[in-house]
Amino acid sequence: MTETTNNNSFKQVYKSTAKVPFEVWFAPKDAEVSYPFVEEAPDPKFKSPMFDWNKYCWFESDSKVQGEQISEMSQSLEKLKNDVASGKISDEAINKQIGTLVGLVSQSAIAQQAASQTTDNKPDSTTDGGAK
């Protein structure tokens, strides 16, 4: 989603690097947007968004939020184990739960990996490409 200022000569873009995970900038409306800037806004639910330049998507980089997500996954897994042991859950429901948990674990692993990696494959640009 691209937002524009009142005079429509600038568009809102977002800067994301290892040193600056998230920062709002403005660029000329007709400017080509490239690293370290992106036009796509992060999910407003993210507490500390960071852009993954390998997968071209935003992710949550806050370790506290990631820890809470892992805790929720652990609780879901424990409930699933109890439901399976007591026979309260069908095979179809088990498969659905496992699929959901695998997806959550994958997202968490990707976020942790991206947060721990540096942007060695991207130049540390000193040009800002737009006015703040």
Image: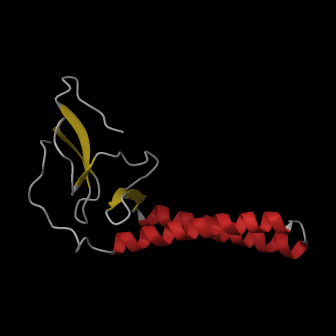
What residue occupies the far right of the structure in this picture?
87
* Picture quadrant where residue 19 is located: bottom left
Q: Quadrant of the N terminus?
A: top left
Q: Where in the figure is residue 43, as x and y percent of width and height?
A: 43, 48
Q: Is residue 110 above or below residue 23?
A: below
Pick whichever, 28 or 109, lies toward us.
28
Q: Is residue 62 above or below residue 34?
A: below
Determine whether, in the image, residue 90 is placed left or right of residue 97. right
Q: Where in the figure is residue 21, as x and y percent of width and height?
A: 29, 59
Q: Is residue 71 visible?
A: no
Q: Is residue 38 visible?
A: yes
Determine whether, in the image, residue 58 is placed left or right of residue 106. left
Name the residue located 21 percent from the left edge and 57 percent from the top edge: 36
What residue occupies the far left of the structure in this picture?
127
Q: Where in the figure is residue 117, as x and y percent of width and height?
A: 32, 75
Name the residue located 41 percent from the left edge and 62 percent from the top edge: 62
Pick whichever, 61 or 131, lies toward us.
131
Name the residue located 47 percent from the left edge and 48 percent from the top edge: 45
Q: Quadrant of the C terminus?
A: top left
